[in-house]
Image: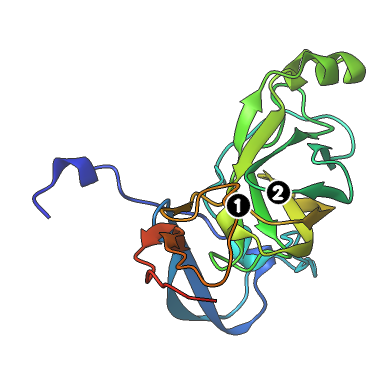
């Protein structure tokens, strides 16, 4: 490409034989870009089995399209029964929200001994369905000494997450937000929180009939409102009306 900034663009994954059954498979490879969202290509393979004689083909991934930008190669020390624990502090269940709002909480893998055991937090409006309903990738690694103290594990100190949810990504009404946490051994696990969304804040303006104006008979109202498509502001037709 003649572009030095593309030097470190390679990827690889060692696919575990226990995750595939014999036969033809279509592998979907997803790449995430902050502006374009998720894009994928496919490759067909014919899998003829492995030397693993155990019938261990259960997937621990909550959704195939969520195995994305998480660090899937990270290893960590653990002791005991592994389990992902996810807690959403904000918003509270069934809270009424408007405009942009903060989603925050913490996530750990309870058996982790030298880290939190979590490498990524993704948030969706409903069950994960790729780029169509993704609300964003949360910032993960925020200090939560209260959680570390509660578990008595200093390695859980930086287990907090937060995401500012853009109002343009939600319609009015009830929503179930799915908060996914990724662990290299368990895959994607999630919890949900129900909210009641009452609309965003408008950045529109009117250039006639200012606030408090008493209107008699007919008048002409002219103004604008920002309309976003794919998170980009688009031109909206200015209309006038005598009604």
Query: Which residue is pictured at 77% across the width and 52% down the height?
Result: 189
Query: Which residue is pictured at 62% across the width and 32% down the height?
Result: 140
On screen, residue 179 versus residue 219, left or right, reads right
**Is residue 212 positioned above or below 77 on the image?**
below
Residue under label 2, please give it: 98
Q: Is residue 37 visible?
A: no
On screen, residue 88 versus residue 67, left or right, reads right
Query: Which residue is pictured at 12% across the width and 55% down the height?
Result: 1
In percent of width and height, residue 23 lies at 60, 86
User: Which element type, helix, strand or loop, lies under badge 2?
Assistant: loop
Quadrant (top left, top right, bottom left, bottom right) of the C terminus: bottom right
Mark 2 crowd level (few <14, some 14–19, many ≥20, 10 Å Cα): some
First in sequence, mark 2 or 1: give its number. Answer: 2
Q: Which dot marks residue 130?
A: none
Q: Is residue 44 visible?
A: yes
Of 110 and 75, the residue lying toward us: 110
In percent of width and height, residue 99 lies at 64, 47
Of 49 and 216, the residue lying toward us: 216
Q: Which dot marks residue 167?
A: 1
């Amino acid at each position: 490409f003649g572009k030095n900034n593309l030097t470190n663009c390679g990827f690889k994954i060692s696919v575990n034989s226990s995750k595939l059954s014999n036969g033809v498979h279509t592998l979907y490879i997803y790449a995430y870009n902050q502006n374009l969202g998720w894009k994928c290509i496919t490759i067909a393979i014919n899998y003829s089995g492995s030397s693993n004689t155990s019938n261990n083909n259960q997937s621990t991934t909550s959704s195939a399209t969520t195995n994305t930008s998480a660090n899937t190669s990270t290893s960590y020390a653990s002791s005991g029964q592994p389990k992902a624990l996810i807690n959403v502090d904000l918003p509270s269940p069934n809270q009424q929200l408007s405009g942009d709002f903060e989603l925050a909480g913490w996530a750990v893998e309870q058996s982790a001994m030298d880290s939190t055991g979590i490498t990524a937090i993704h948030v969706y409006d409903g069950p994960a369905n790729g780029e169509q309903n993704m609300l964003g990738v949360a910032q993960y690694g925020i200090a939560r000494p209260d959680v570390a103290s509660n578990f008595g594990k200093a390695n859980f100190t930086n287990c907090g997450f937060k995401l500012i949810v853009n109002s343009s990504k939600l319609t009015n009404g009830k929503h179930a937000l799915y908060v996914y946490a990724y662990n290299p051994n368990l895959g994607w696990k999630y919890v949900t929180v129900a909210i009641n969304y009452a609309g965003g804040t408008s950045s529109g303006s009117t250039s006639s009939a200012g606030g408090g104006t008493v209107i008699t008979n007919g008048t002409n109202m002219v103004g604008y409102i920002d309309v976003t498509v794919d998170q980009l502001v688009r031109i909206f037709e200015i209309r006038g009306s005598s009604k």
